[in-house]
Amino acid sequence: DQQVKQNSPSLSVQEGRISILNCDYTNSMFDYFLWYKKYPAEGPTFLISISSIKDKNEDGRFTVFLNKSAKHLSLHIVPSQPGDSAVYFCAASPGNTPLVFGKGTRLSVIA
Amino acid sequence: SQTIHQWPATLVQPVGSPLSLECTVEGTSNPNLYWYRQAAGRGLQLLFYSVGIGQISSEVPQNLSASRPQDRQFILSSKKLLLSDSGFYLCASAGQNYGYTFGSGTRLTVV
């Protein structure tokens, strides 16, 4: 049973445009959500997070939106840059237990 | 900040051979430690986690095992590798705000 779902395996966006990566979850006990970025042959690196008590968190070009009623979160990257090309993982925490990760979305930013 | 050291970076092993992957952590004490595997199309799958020396929780049945002989050392082992053990293995340490710091990973190919 997949508790964190990233239904789009890949996404292509032109440089300078907005990238929107989506994530859905099923467990209502999740109280913290994170996005990680991963380049090939490297470990994931933390990008941005949001607590369940908020609906938006912004950090530079990156914004995460949380819709608790829909159990949905999204990552917006504006403007997209070629260096943003990577696999993005959505993760959720049900408290003091291991993070649950989605399968990832491969973003390609085309110059 | 934490640093995760993982080695080797790549490994090619024959079926039936043993495995030992080591992970050490700097910059923190008594961390929660995790082994994840990224297999093709499977995202990040949690294999083991440890909240302290000698304390190991297994998340999936498999022919892998983990040990934590020291506070900042986490080892992933197998007595006999299977083809299905191929993948990218990642060690992680829990940090602040539910986030994890990942190592650079080991690409294991079982042939």
Image: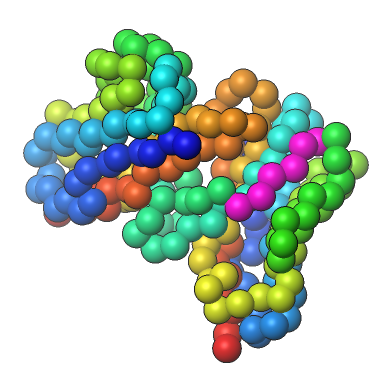
Residue at image coords 66%, 50%: A48
- The foreground one among B27 and B36 is B27
Residue at image coords 52%, 37%: B100
How far across and how far down the image is residue A1, in percent? 61, 37
B49 horizontally vs B70: left or right: right
Tell me, yes or no, if residue B86 can be seen here: no
- Magenta includes A18? no
Q: Is residue B39 above or below residue A33?
A: below
In the current view of this chain or complex, which residue is farthest to the bottom? Answer: A111
How far across and how far down the image is residue B65, in percent? 28, 25
Task: Tell me which segment is drawn in magenta.
Answer: A47-52
The image quadrant that residue B51 belongs to is: top left
- Magenta includes A50? yes
B100 horizontally vs B48: left or right: right
Residue at image coords 17%, 51%: B11
Residue at image coords 47%, 37%: B1
In the current view of this chain or complex, which residue is farthest to the top? Answer: B54
- The foreground one among B52 and A4 is B52
The image quadrant that residue A19 belongs to is: bottom right
Give the prevailing secondary structure in the magenta stretch: strand
Q: Disc count in the image?
A: 0
Q: Is residue B59 above or below residue A52?
A: above
- Which quadrant of the rendered structure holds the C terminus of chain A? bottom right
